[in-house]
């Protein structure tokens, strides 16, 4: 399957958001990645519901929400009503994360988890039976532009082996540089969330950047 590229919209130019969505769509991104933060689960405030609603209304591409919030179960119906295609939840955000994932499935949304750098594969092993995607955070969540944590490579390799057994995809989020995309796509990572390391703020057309990334993972 082709490698999927998701645009991390917290890095977009909010003074020209309509133009950004159109340019990214025309550039060939596969999805729009929306980081929702509540200031509690991570020490930052991310994008809001109004941002999500607008981007959902402005594109026919997939829209995925990464919930860095406490107790996401109470909001799943809201995200379903907005029309997101995939929801990432953190296992530590809920006492019974399996119940949250079951609610996501019931609503017809792709169920996915995000794993922090400090969360081991063993801690989420039982959840791998019910998710379709695992988003590996290569940086601590909450802020763009952080330094890549190199020990994540071993975790990705372990998850790739389990993915074949449990039937889920492994995606990458955090410092998705050209070098990391090339290296980890070659061993089986199926998708990358692109932020400031490869896509935004480069002074080059998005179409040129996406074309170059696709060329390096053939």
Image (cartoon, rainbow, N blue to C red):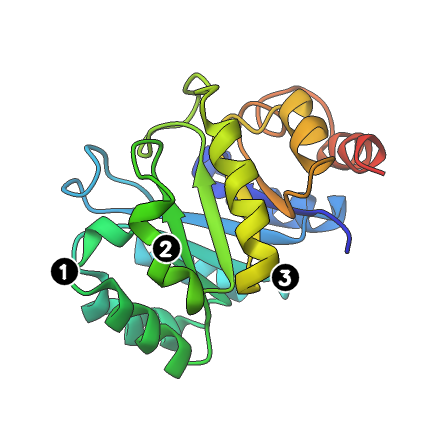
Residue at numbered disc 3: 61
- How crowded pointer 3 is (Cα within 10 Å; few <14, some 14-19, many 20+) is rated as some
Q: Which residue is drawn at 69% across and 27% down?
A: 183
The residue mark sitting in front, 3 or 1, is 1
Residue 59 percent coordinates (x, y): 60, 61
Residue at numbered disc 2: 125
- The answer for how far apart the CA atoms under marks 3 and 1 are is 32 Å
- The answer for how far apart the CA atoms under marks 3 and 2 are is 31 Å
Is residue 51 among the parts visible in the rendering?
no
* Residue sitting at the far top: 147
User: Residue 14 versus residue 40: which sits nearer the camera?
Assistant: 40
Determine whether the residue tagged by mark 3 lies in a helix, strand or loop.
loop
Residue 165 percent coordinates (x, y): 57, 61
- How crowded pointer 2 is (Cα within 10 Å; few <14, some 14-19, many 20+) is rated as few
Residue 98 to residue 48: above or below: below
Residue at numbered disc 1: 95
Determine whether the residue tagged by mark 2 lies in a helix, strand or loop.
helix
Q: Residue at x 77, y 51 (%)?
A: 2
């Amino acid at each position: 399957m082709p490698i999927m590229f998701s645009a991390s919209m917290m890095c977009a130019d909010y003074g020209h958001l309509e133009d950004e969505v159109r340019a990214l769509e025309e550039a060939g991104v596969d999805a729009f990645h929306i980081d929702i933060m509540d200031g509690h689960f991570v020490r930052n405030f991310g994008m809001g519901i109004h941002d999500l609603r607008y981007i959902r209304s402005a594109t026919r591409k997939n829209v995925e929400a990464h919930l860095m919030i406490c107790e996401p179960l109470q909001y799943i119906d809201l995200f379903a009503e907005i029309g997101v295609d995939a929801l990432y939840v953190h296992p530590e955000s809920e006492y019974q994360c399996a119940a949250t994932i079951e609610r996501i499935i019931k609503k017809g949304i792709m169920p996915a988890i995000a794993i922090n750098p400090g969360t081991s594969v063993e801690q989420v092993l039982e959840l791998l039976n019910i998710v379709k995607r695992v988003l590996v955070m290569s940086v601590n969540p909450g802020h763009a532009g952080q330094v890549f944590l190199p020990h994540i490579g071993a975790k990705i390799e372990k998850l790739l082996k389990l993915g074949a057994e449990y039937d889920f995809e492994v995606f990458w989020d955090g410092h998705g540089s050209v070098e990391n995309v090339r290296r980890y796509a070659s061993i089986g990572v199926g998708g990358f969330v692109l932020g400031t390391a490869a896509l935004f703020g480069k002074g080059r057309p998005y179409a040129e950047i996406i074309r170059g990334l696709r060329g390096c993972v053939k």
